[in-house]
Image (tube, rainbow, N blue to C red):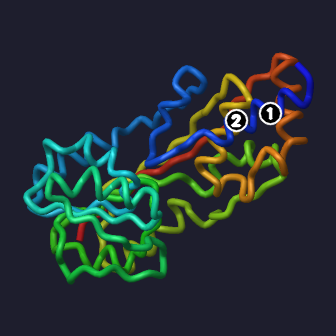
Amino acid sequence: MSLKAQIAIWKQEEEKPFSGWDFSYLDGRWKVEQPPWDYFSRAAELMQQSSSAIDMGTGGGEELLRLKKYWPQKITATEAYLPNLKLAIERLRPFGVKVVDVPINEDDLMPFTDNEFELVLNRHSGFNPIEVARILAPGGIFLTQQVHGLSFYDLMSCFQAKSQYPEATLENYLPKLKTVGLKIVNTQEWSGKISFTDVGAMVYYLKAIPWVVPGFSVETHSKYLLSLQECLENGEALTFTTRQYLIEARK
């Protein structure tokens, strides 16, 4: 295949639509190892023990809908990314979920009252430990699964990129959660592999999660993509390292 034709194919992948947190387009073209814990099973257990819950950074609401039969009487979700916010509203509000546009990071405040939720869920979204502790009811649980700040370090190096969030580590957040009065109930950390069958699948993935390689595009990063294509043709696997950790804390 000519260089021009190859790049044209990758640009088609780059233009494929992506919404919510749905990577089904890559079915059969990638393989992602999963951590030994089951975040959703634990979230379901905790929901059944709670009368109120909030899902921070719900994305398009697709993951929260997986837990619908376990929802407590009061359920709230936040999302700040406009395309996902619209999806979350469309999907969740018909079922009585309050969906709020709230930026989630270590500095922002949240428009909720003190002690408002018995369960605070957070999967792969930023959070302010002080605010989490404030909105959590006494005896309530904070459950979060996070992508380690150095996850995909080997993938980033292929594009001469560096982690945007190197401080996103278990060691960084545990003292902060303890300082605001939360008792750590459980922590786990894990490292696994993510593999792609073709470079085009990587293009789609990197466009969907732009914080891995900031400013990524086929146009600006073609030399790196061509290098990966050469590796693939030489029999090397497109396999990289993913890292995650889990924290469960009680107020």
Q: Residue at x 64, y 54 (%)?
A: 210
State the SS at label 1: helix
Q: Residues within 10 Å of mark 2 (few under 14, many from 20)?
A: few
Query: Which image quarter is the C terminus in?
Result: bottom left
Q: Residue at x 91, y 29 (%)?
A: 3
Q: Nearer the viewer, residue 155 or 203?
A: 203
State the SS at label 2: helix
Mark 1 near mark 2, Cβ–Cβ under 8 Å? Answer: yes
Query: Which image quarter is the N terminus in?
Result: top right
Query: How far from the left and from the top, in percent, is residue 121?
Result: 30, 58
**Relative to 51, is 225 on the left or the right?**
right
**Relative to 198, is 66 on the left or the right?**
left
Q: Residue at x 83, y 47 (%)?
A: 219
**Relative to 249, is 242 on the left or the right?**
right
Q: Residues within 10 Å of mark 1 (few under 14, many from 20)?
A: few
Q: Nearer the viewer, residue 118 or 7?
A: 7
Query: How far from the left and from the top, in percent, is residue 103?
Result: 44, 73
Query: How far from the left and from the top, in percent, is residue 63?
Result: 33, 45
* Residue type at the position of mark 2: Gln
Examine the rendered structure and indicate whether residue 241 appears above or below residue 122. above
Label 1 – label 2 distance at C-alpha: 6 Å
Examine the rendered structure and indicate whether residue 114 appears above or below residue 171. below
Query: How far from the left and from the top, in percent, is residue 55?
Result: 30, 59
Q: Which residue is mark 1?
A: 8
Q: Nearer the viewer, residue 93 or 35?
A: 93
* Residue 78 position by quadrant: bottom left
Q: Which residue is mark 2?
A: 12
* Residue 51 position by quadrant: bottom left
* Residue type at the position of mark 1: Ala
